[in-house]
Amino acid sequence: MVNRPLHAVMGLEPAALTASLSAALDGTGPALLPVDPATPAPRLRALLGALRPDALRTPDGTTALPDPAPTGPGTALVIATSGSTGTPKGVELSAAALRHSAAASVRRLGAAPGDAWLCVLPTAHVSGLQVLLRALVSGGDLLTGGADPAAALAAAGGRRPHVSLVPTQLRRLLAEGADLSRFGAILVGGAAAGDGLLDAARAAGGRVVTTYGMSETCGGCVYDGVPLDGVAVRTDPGGRVLLSGPVLFQGYRLDPDRTRAHLAADADGTRWFATGDLGTVGPDGRLRVRGRADDLINTGGHKVVPGEVAGVLARVGGVAEAVVVGRPDPEWGERVTAVVVPADPADPPTLERLRAAVRAELPAYAAPRELELRAALPLLASGKPDLAALRAPGRAQE
């Protein structure tokens, strides 16, 4: 359906949201713009003003909004990108792309009709919405629970549901000594998960699958480094990851210039999306993501990929979580800073130990020059680390 209404939906219960999502997919209802109910009022006004839906629907009713704009052809869902600052950006996804993504995921996981799916992620983000979509396309039951370990385990019951988690949630389940065999497939995405975390999860009985993707690809489209059916991956000469296939978005809502900057077609008409990530594709076709291109740290004229450094730190004994950021430095331009959550606060890793671990695997200039210890990492609503907050100076060891 072309130019059907777009409704922003906020605070709906999962069952009501699923019904609306089903109607958006089959064209009997408006396209949807899910909004996090915790969105501050100024941010909500900016989002609605930039993406121009026809109405805002909440549990209290539906309110018509001024100056609505039509949706793109076939659009069923608009995802507002994560983040807390800047101009809101809307990713337009078609019903066909969403169905293909969900069905390809179900096939890859070997999920059976009627399997249960547990949603513990925010449904204003594509990762949470995909859980609802997989349940819809597979005819499975949707279970919902809180993000904390006890609530997730209680919601799982004896159903062995498939579940999507961010690394922090998986780490918390392990810290509680959870038996991960109580879940079916455990999809882990949204941020890099270190080998140590994945190994521990599998040792605890988890069938863990890492996912890579973003709103522009209907969520995860590469599982354990292998693209889903119909998806292709390559890199450009600068190492940026490019993705193609039927899961790609239509474009950025009301922003043709941004769309042209990120979507381009080959001579044969194949559309490719230029992601913001750096990576390599091995001879076996597996994708290895190095980190965000925009997050590169320029220290003393050298380029450091924070994700690669964090991957090394995650394997160091005594490190529960690690994020690497660049902070302003008068001598080096930026200094490589490790923000670490220690496994044992009484016996945290030292800066020299972390530097030695990095120097053993990466060039010496990639070794952190600063260490900040935290009890927990600040997270965005999507579950990803809040890099803007982490770049702010804290109490650090140098």
Image (tube, grey):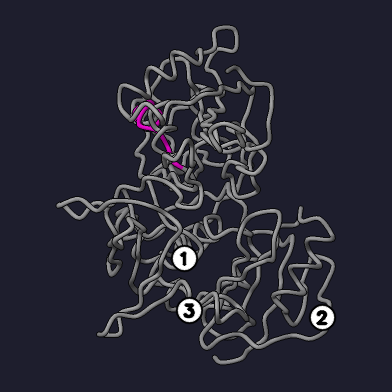
**Front in this rendered view, residue 199 or 295:** 295
Secondary structure state at the residue bearing disc 1 = loop
Tell me which amino acid carries mark 3: Arg
Q: Residues within 10 Å of mark 2 (few under 14, many from 20)?
A: some
Residue 126 image point, x, y percent: 54, 60
Q: CA distance from mark 1 to mark 3?
A: 19 Å
Task: Give the secondary structure at mark 3.
Answer: helix
Q: Is residue 344 above or below residue 395?
A: above
In the displayed structure, 93 sits above or below 293; it is below
Locate residue 302, reporting x and y percent: 41, 39
Q: Position of residue 263 (x, y in %)?
A: 43, 75
**Residues drawn in magenta:** 192-200
Q: Disc 1 designates what residue?
A: 218
Q: Position of residue 19 (x, y in %)?
A: 61, 70
User: Residue drawn at (58%, 46%), measured in percent from left and top?
Assistant: 120
Is residue 196 rendered magenta in the image?
yes
Residue, far bottom: 2
Residue sitting farthest toward the front: 331
Specify the label residue 260 is tagged with.
Answer: 3
